[in-house]
Image (spheres, rainbow, N blue to C red):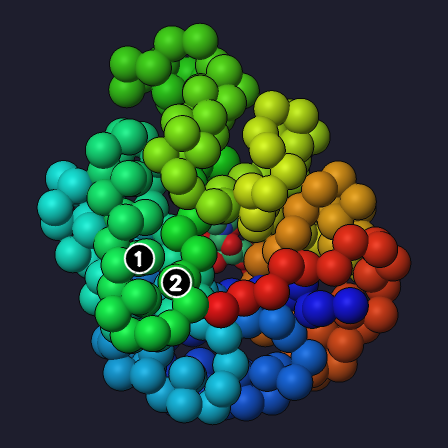
Amino acid sequence: MRNPIIVALDVPTADLALELAQALAPVVGAVKVGKELFVSAGPEIVRRLRATGVAVFLDLKFHDIPNTTAAAVAAATRLDVQMLTLHTSGGLAMMRAAEEAALATARELRREPPLVLGVTVLTSMDDADLAAVGTLGGTTTQVERLAKLADAAGLRGLVCSPQELGLLRRVLPQTLQLVTPGIRPASAAVGDQKRTMTPDAALQAGADWLVIGRPITSAPDPRAAAEEILSSLQATKPAPSLP
Ligand code: C5P
């Protein structure tokens, strides 16, 4: 079975990120570089992580006009990341341009295109928050609407909360890859995540990839924590291959 664990390297320096990646690379499927690390350490951290051979998920959640988003996706593809994110609320044309940029740039470089993942509604927002920015109808309706739009735009994957897995597996083609944060092993502290699921339950509910941060990175022995999670996974569905 392929390793579905993506460890979130939510640390402020390149040294800390590389140290964690070195310890964890053999026991995770990929590492996630988010805004904090990218803004602190720059694209060089991605190059250094890739040089170790580990797959990289660049989680910068692009949201801009189609031309600008496509250029950012092309640049991320040249950096050789295997997954990246954008906000589906940027619309159909933006998502199409992003997917096309990933495919075209990868073709030029003769490598596999990164998986462009759509983010629907941030899990920090509830129905009232959405209404306050002019979106009526509630989060579930909006998640479904944006997920279908992402599929129509040709995206091959989405980020979603564990609670959305059931809905999205029902309404989307099974080929779409679902990446899920908010994962907590039964033994771990929940922290600021409000709606969590265990790693195995999330895979059973339809996740392809699990984004896990603090339960691994804040553990006294991160590698042992990742190994324990890995051995808790009984799902039969293997994670799809990454470029
Ligand atoms: O430490 P923890 O396991 O909560 O980390 C989860 C990671 O997933 C963090 O990098 C966080 O930014 C990200 N994330 C999330 N919830 C979302 C989207 C992304 O927790 N809805």
- The image shows residue 214, relative to residue 146, as above or below, that is below
Mark 2: which amino acid? Answer: Pro
Q: 10 Å neighbourhood of mark 1: few (<14), some, or many (≥20)?
A: many
- Residue 137 left/right relative to 232: left
- Residue 87 left/right relative to 180: left
Q: Are marks 1 and 2 in contact (CB under 8 Å)?
A: yes
In front of the other: 216 or 61: 61
Q: Position of residue 160 (x, y in %)?
A: 54, 40
Q: Position of residue 119 (x, y in %)?
A: 42, 41
Mark 1: which amino acid? Answer: Ala
Q: Which quarter of the figure has residue 219?
A: bottom right
Q: Secondary structure at mark 1?
A: helix
Residue at 69% in and 30% down: 166
Name the image quarter holding the N terminus: bottom right
Residue at 54% in and 66% down: 242
Residue that label 2 marks = 113
Whether residue 220 appears in this view of the structure is no
Q: Position of residue 212 (x, y in %)?
A: 61, 61
Which mark is on residue 120? none
Mark 1 or 2, nearer chain start: 1
CA distance separating discs 1 and 2: 6 Å
Q: Secondary structure at mark 2?
A: loop
Residue that label 1 marks = 102
- The image shows residue 210, relative to residue 221, as above or below, that is above
Whether residue 22 appears in this view of the structure is yes
Q: Position of residue 157 (x, y in %)?
A: 49, 46
